[in-house]
Amino acid sequence: MKHNIAAERMRDIQPFHVMALLAEARQREAAGQDIIHLEVGEPDFPTPSPIVEAGIRALQAGQTKYTAARGLPQLREAIAGYYASRFGVKVSAERILVTPGASGALQLVLGSLLNPGDEVLMTDPGYPCNRHFVRMFEGKAVTIPVGADTNYQLTPEHVRQYWNDATKAVLLASPANPTGTLLSVDALKAIHATVKQLGGILLVDEIYQGLVYGQASETALSVGSEDIWVINSFSKYFGMTGWRLGWVVVPEQMVGTLDRLAQNIFLAAPTPAQYAALAAFTPEALDIMERQRQELQCRRDFLLPALSGLGFTVRTQPRGAFYIYAGSGRFGNDAQRLCQDMLDKTGVVFTPGLDFGSHRAETHVRFAYTTNVGRLEQAVERLARNLLH
C-alpha cells in the first residue's frame, strides 16, 4: 500500500498568500525597483538599544546554555512585575512560562488542552496560524464570521450560538490582527462568564498589547479570574521579532503540564534573548517603546483618512496593533488580484483578506503601517494615480 509522504493534516494548513507577493517584491527590489512594504507585521524600528546591549552582555558573559523549560526565574518575575506596575494586576510568576515566541506559547497551550476533535471558537477574519495550530493538534477550528457591527470581535451571543458538545475553548485577540480592534475588560468579563457557564476555557491573545491608541492598554488578567489563559510576546510592543521570545500565563494547576510539554517540544526559549528581555522593562527601554507607539499612532492617523480618500472603506476604527483592515469592494471582488495589480503597477505591497479567513475575504485587504509617514505618503500617491480615475 502506497502512502502519501505528507500527513493528512497538511492539506488543511495553508501558506500565507501574501508570501508569493513578498517573494516577487523582493525579486523586484533586487532588480532595482523601489518597493513600499505595507504587508508584513514587523515595524521598521530596531530593537530598543537597552535590550540589544543586555543581549550583547549576556553573550559576552557566556550566557548561552539552556535555561529551565519554564524560562529564567528572574524574567518570569520581571513579567509578573510588569503586570503589577503597568496594569495593577497581581500575577504569580509561577503561572508564567517563557516560550520561543508567542507561536511557542500557542503550541504549548493547544497541545496541552486539545484532544482529537475538540473545537476552538475564533473570529473570521483572524490570524491564520491560530486555526492551523488547532489543526496541528487534531482539533477543529470553528471560525465565526464577524463584522464591524461587533467590532470584528466575538460576543457572548456568538459563543452561545456556536457552542456544542465538542467545544473546548474560545480564542480571542485584543488588539486583533488584522483589524486592530480591542475588547474592553467589561466585554472580556461577559465572554468569560459565558464560556465558564458552558464549561469551556477562555484563551486570550494579547500579542499586540501596549500598541493601543487613544486609550489605556488593558489585559484580560484584569478580569480577576485565574482560569483565563493569556498569550503574549516580546515581538511587537517590545520590538524583538527576531529574538523569538514570548510568554503565557496559565492556571496554576496546569503549569506542570505545560512545563512537561515544553521540555519535549523546544526544551527552552533562546537563552541570550531571555537575558536581553530583562532590559525590556527598564525605564529607558519603556521610554523608547512609548515614543515608537506614538509614532505608530501618527502613521495610523495619516493612513486611515488617506485610504478612505482612495476609495477603501474602514468600517471600524483600528485602536491597536499596526494594521488597517479595509474594504476593497469598490475595486472588484478579487482582493488577491488587486494586491498583485498594485504591486505590478505601483510597487506598493499589501495583504489580501484571504490570508485571514473566508468571510468577505475577497473584498478586504490589510495595510500594515510599519514604515514611516514619508513612505506612506509615497504609497498613497502611487495608489492614487492608479485607483482614482
Image (cartoon, rainbow, N blue to C red):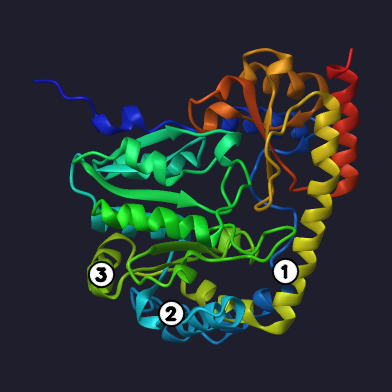
40 displayed left or right of 45: left
Check contact, mark 1 vs mark 2: CB within 8 A. Answer: no
- Between tags 1 and 2, which lies in front? 2
Residue placed under numbered mark 2 in the picture: 91
Residue 76 rendering spot, x and y as whole percentages: 45, 80
Camera-side residue of 41 and 178: 178
Spatial CA span between label 3 and label 1: 32 Å
- Between tags 3 and 2, which lies in front? 2
Residue placed under numbered mark 1 in the picture: 289
Residue 98 rendering spot, x and y as whole percentages: 42, 71
The residue tagged with tag 3: helix, strand or loop?
helix
Residue name at image x 62 percent, y 80 percent: 281
| Three-letter amino acid code at the position of disc 1 | Met
Camera-side residue of 293 and 31: 293
| Three-letter amino acid code at the position of disc 2 | Val
Residue 273 rendering spot, x and y as whole percentages: 53, 72
Quarter of the image for residue 380 reads top right
Q: Is residue 101 visible?
A: yes
Spatial CA span between label 3 and label 2: 15 Å
Residue name at image x 91 percent, y 30 percent: 381
| Three-letter amino acid code at the position of disc 3 | Met
- Say which label, 3 or 1, has the lower sequence index: 3
97 displayed left or right of 209: left
